[in-house]
Image (cartoon, rainbow, N blue to C red):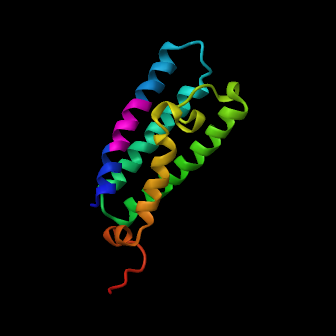
Amino acid sequence: MSAIGYVLGISYPLLALSTGARGVYQLFFRDDLPKLAPALSIFSSLLYLVAAVGFFKRSPRAWRVSVTALSIEAIGVLTVGTLSILAPDLLGHTAWSRFGMDYGFFPLIQPLLGLSWLLYRPTRAAYGVGPVRQA
């Protein structure tokens, strides 16, 4: 696995833990928040876990699952991030609010970096995905 793969494989479980803990705390101990906000945080933490497993397991199926999870994550971050700026009270405060600003914008950067890495030819070859040409 390349350095980027290791970074993603380590950072995704950490982000899953932090967003999952935040979502569970908000869901059970913060009655003043709309329930959609913690639900989105918990959903994002599950996506992070799915992607993390795919980073370490080398198979075409794991690659497809990771690409799907990261695509959903990227769309979610862009959608929730945009809505949180245009209509801040609509969704409440989630891990993806303001494009993940509370998490140093990692929720925005990580899926884009992860997709770039997964779509990179040597990575696809390591997963056994797509046409692999010998030089």
Q: Nearer the viewer, residue 102 or 128?
A: 102
Seen from this angle, which residue lies furthest bottom? Answer: 135
Residue placed most toward the observer, 104 or 128: 104
Q: Quadrant of the C terminus?
A: bottom left
Q: Is residue 99 above or below residue 28?
A: below
At a point 44% along the width and 31% down the height, the residue shown is: 19
State yes or no: residue 64 in magenta: no
Compared with 11, 118 (above or below) is: below
Quadrant including the N terminus = bottom left
Dominant SS type (magenta): helix
Looking at the picture, how far across and down is residue 68, in whole percent?
A: 50, 56
Q: Residue at x 62, y 38 (%)?
A: 80
Residue that sits furthest to the right in the current view: 86
Residue drawn at the location 33% of the way across and 64% of the way down? 59
- Specify whether 86 is left or right of 106: right
- Say left or right for 124 vs 41: left
Image location of residue 46, percent across then percent down: 44, 40
Give the quarter of the image for residue 90.
top right
Stretch in magenta: 11-19
Residue 15 magenta-drawn? yes
Above-or-below relation of 9 to 40 = below
